[in-house]
Amino acid sequence: MLNQEKTGKFMAEMRRQQNLTQKQLAEQVGVSDKTVSKWETGRSMPDNAIIMDVCLLLNISVNELLSGEKFSEEHYVGKAEENMLELVKETEYHKQKGKWTIAGTIFSFILLVFACIFTILSASGVESLVWYIDLPSIIIPLGITFFVLFASESMWDFFQGFGIVYGRKEYSDERIIQAWLAMKTVLVTIPVSGVFSFLVSVVAIIGHLSNIELLGPHLAVAILSLFYCCIMEILLIPTAVRLRKKTQRR
């Protein structure tokens, strides 16, 4: 697995050896100094279109950049092959991650649309199944959670966590850590979104309620969002605990 943090530190070291500032390097390759800063802190990598220019300015090869270290000529061929394999794996990973991100975005949007519709129907006193199965109380927290996963580009990492815990395939340390971070994000987001759903329901009830006698039943339905979130948390905790143990063993 490509270690971007190691590569970033190596780039910073090579830049200083060439007596270049981040701004000077940025100007010569046509990017901002903030972009160079992201490279050197491991938050991103140079685009394929300019990676050769970056290497020429830093007086290193592409393989040395990807490896995050200088190496002797006899080690060059072996390291080149290793980097190519890592790039193939990285490309495949990002393809899968992109598919899950798109699917998750569509799914979360649909959930939020349905949540808005059912919230209005429920708050308006429409007699329906919302009295017995409160869909907004489920859909809003799920929609928010999936949106957070999409925004943090962790959708694929979250679902991959289940494969890491319950599957037989071996995963790299970095994949396991990314899956754990995504799982932790979900565990934090679910209760927060449950509280948000509850507050939205309360505001909607107060704004549409015409009969004070219905306040109790409506509030009871609004509290269901907190109940559903507790259930989701309980269901995820066993997977989260096992995933956390895997990170500690590494």
Image: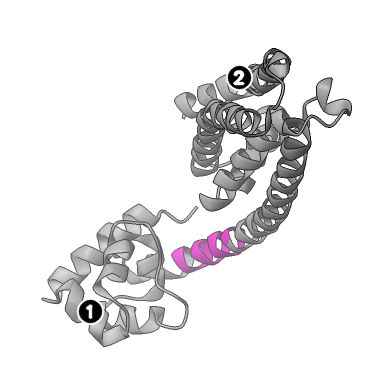
Point out which mark residue 237 bears. 2
In this rendering, position of residue 96 left or right of residue 1: right
Residue at the location (67% across, 53% down)? 105
Q: Is residue 67 above or below residue 161?
A: below
Residue range in magenta is 79-90
Tell me which amino acid carries mark 1. Answer: Leu
In this rendering, position of residue 9 left or right of residue 42: left
Residue identifier under label 1? 25
Tell me which amino acid carries mark 2. Answer: Ile
Residue 208 position in % (x across, y down): 67, 33
Q: Quadrant of residue 18?
A: bottom left
Q: Who is closer to the viewer here, 27 or 172?
A: 27
Res 171 seen here: yes
In this rendering, position of residue 244 left or right of residue 235: left
Point out which mark residue 135 bears. none
Depth-wise, is mark 2 or mark 1 nearer the camera?
2
Residue 66 position in % (x across, y down): 41, 65
Residue 129 position in % (x across, y down): 88, 27
Q: Residue furthest right?
A: 128
Residue at the location (59% across, 33% down)? 200
Q: Quadrant of residue 186?
A: top right
